[in-house]
Image (cartoon, grey):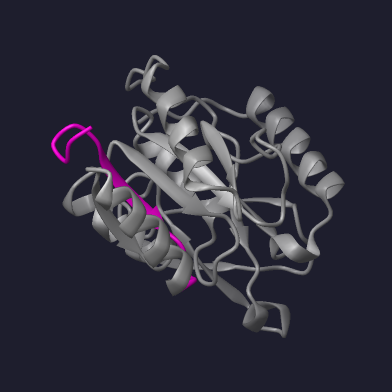
Amino acid sequence: MTETQVKLLIVDDEPLIRSSISHALADLGYGVRVAEDGFSALRAIRQQAPDILISDLNMAGMSGFELLSVVRRRFPEMQTIAMSGAFSGDEVPSGVAADAFYQKGSSIGALLQIMGTLAHTERRAARPYSAPAPIWIQRDAQAALGDAYVTIACPECLRTFPGAVGSSICQTRETICVYCRFPIKYAIVEPVERLPVQVLRQAHAEAQATQESAAQFYY
């Protein structure tokens, strides 16, 4: 593979992991860019969309949960790989909007195998999404201590604005982007290391139920 064939964006808030993965893949001929969090990743995507996005799930600011949700809606043709040390195996965790999952601590060879599988998978055609499930926004430490707001990224214009946290997690809320007036559904979740897997599954089931009953919104 050459740099012109596959462009990668690697997103992780841990410098060592970000550096080691990016250097390994760059040495193999991939065109690699890095971002330290979801907000930086969106800025990089606006400059140039990668072929494959590889994102950590548990990050401060904008988590991988939210970033992948935004990318799935705004760039449905982009292939995505979620990575985390909080989940095991090779199955995409329930409720995560990614095409594949890479367990942190596994070999680069395992990541290459996942990417090879994606290369032989038919890419999603760009299409409108109706009544999308809520974006998952991770409650950060400051919000957990009483901050009334989190930062929401609009999946349409990719700009950010504050949104209410509320007192409960996994409860769907609705708002409108203050810039482009796009309707957004979102839910606040605890950081992944504090959130049991069964709660993630329950939130995903609730999101699917919301999707089936909500009014239709199109891009």
Instruction: Examine the image and state in which quarter residue 72 appears.
Output: top left
Q: Please give left or right for residue 119 compared with residue 184 in the image.
A: left
Q: Horizontal and vertical percent for residue 133?
A: 60, 36
Quarter of the picture containing the N terminus is top left
* Residue located 18% across and 32% down the image: 5
- The magenta segment is 1-14
Q: Horizontal and vertical percent for residue 191?
A: 69, 65
Q: Please give left or right for residue 11 compared with residue 209 in the image.
A: left
Do we see residue 71 in this rendering? yes
Q: Nearer the viewer, residue 18 or 189?
A: 18
Q: Horizontal and vertical percent for residue 202?
A: 82, 41
* Residue located 22% across and 43% down the image: 29
Q: Horizontal and vertical percent for residue 168?
A: 79, 63
Residue furthest left in the image: 4
Instruction: Examine the image and state in which quarter residue 63 appears.
Output: bottom right
Q: Main secondary structure of the magenta part?
A: loop
